[in-house]
Image (spheres, rainbow, N blue to C red):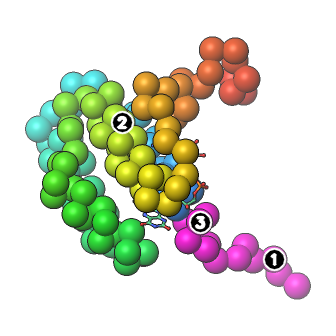
Amino acid sequence: KEYFDCPLDSQSLGRNTWSFLHTMAAYYPETPTAFEKNNMQSFLNSFSWVYPCGNCADHLRKHITKSPPTLNNAKDLSTWLCNTHNKVNKRLGKPIFDCSAVFERWRDGPDDGRCDFS
Ligand code: FAD
């Protein structure tokens, strides 16, 4: 019998999506062009309409309207996204993440080298 992975439930969809979003923000340019800023703005707007969890997308749209993404550089965007994720964490009773560690978590890895695989 051929093996298929199971469809995602909302938890693993959320986890995988946050991984993508935080990684995307961590690798956003240091000095983005107007084109790159526009692309990111459009992506986040569109994403907030198409994310396949109605409630989550609803909350995200309201959040984007109230606190629009900061698109100046990778640090600003990563911090905005971290705060956005923390809003969801708070709503769900999950631990609040320390946003000063966002690059360590999503781009550089910890200093002790445990995430260096090369
Ligand atoms: P996740 O919250 O998925 O986090 C994954 C990893 O990210 C963590 O292990 C941690 O290492 C890291 N992390 C945690 N917080 C931060 C942060 N602030 N900044 C950077 N890194 C961090 N679920 C609902 O039930 N209701 C909702 O309204 C809802 N809205 C969502 C909106 C969006 C845009 C997304 C992508 C997901 C949403 N979810 C929602 C799903 C929910 O946020 C979780 O993804 C899901 O509950 C699984 O949680 P988790 O404990 O595995 O960790």
Horizontal side of 67 relative to 90 (left or right) equals left
On screen, 118 above or below 27?
A: above
Does dot 3 land on a helix, a strand or a loop?
Answer: helix
User: Is label 3 within 8 A of ligand 1 (CB to nearest ligand atom)?
Assistant: yes
**Residue for point 70% across, 76% down:** 6
- Whether residue 118 is visible to the viewer of this picture, yes or no, is no
Does dot 2 land on a helix, a strand or a loop?
Answer: helix
User: Is label 2 within 8 A of ligand 1 (CB to nearest ligand atom)?
Assistant: yes
Amino acid type, residue under disc 3 in the picture:
Gln
**Residue for point 59% across, 25% down:** 109
Magenta residue span:
1-13
Q: Which mark is residue 104?
A: none
* Disc 2 residue crowd, few under 14, some 14–19, many 20+, Cα 10 Å: many
3 in magenta: yes
**Alpha carbon separation for disc pair 3 and 2:** 22 Å
**Extreme residue in the bottom direction:** 1
Residue 54 image position (x, y, % from top left): 37, 78
Q: Answer with mark 3 or mark 2, whichever residue precedes in sequence.
A: 3
**Residue for point 29% across, 71% down:** 58
Mark 3, residue position: 11
CB contact under 8 Å: marks 3 and 2: no
Residue 72 image position (x, y, % from top left): 19, 31
* Disc 3 residue crowd, few under 14, some 14–19, many 20+, Cα 10 Å: few
Mark 1, residue position: 3
Does dot 1 land on a helix, a strand or a loop?
Answer: loop
- Whether residue 13 is visible to the viewer of this picture, yes or no, is yes
Q: Answer with mark 2 or mark 1, whichever residue precedes in sequence.
A: 1
- The C terminus appears in which quarter of the rendering? top right
Mark 2, residue position: 78
Q: Which of the two discs, 2 and 1, sits closer to the camera?
A: 2
Amino acid type, residue under disc 1 in the picture:
Tyr
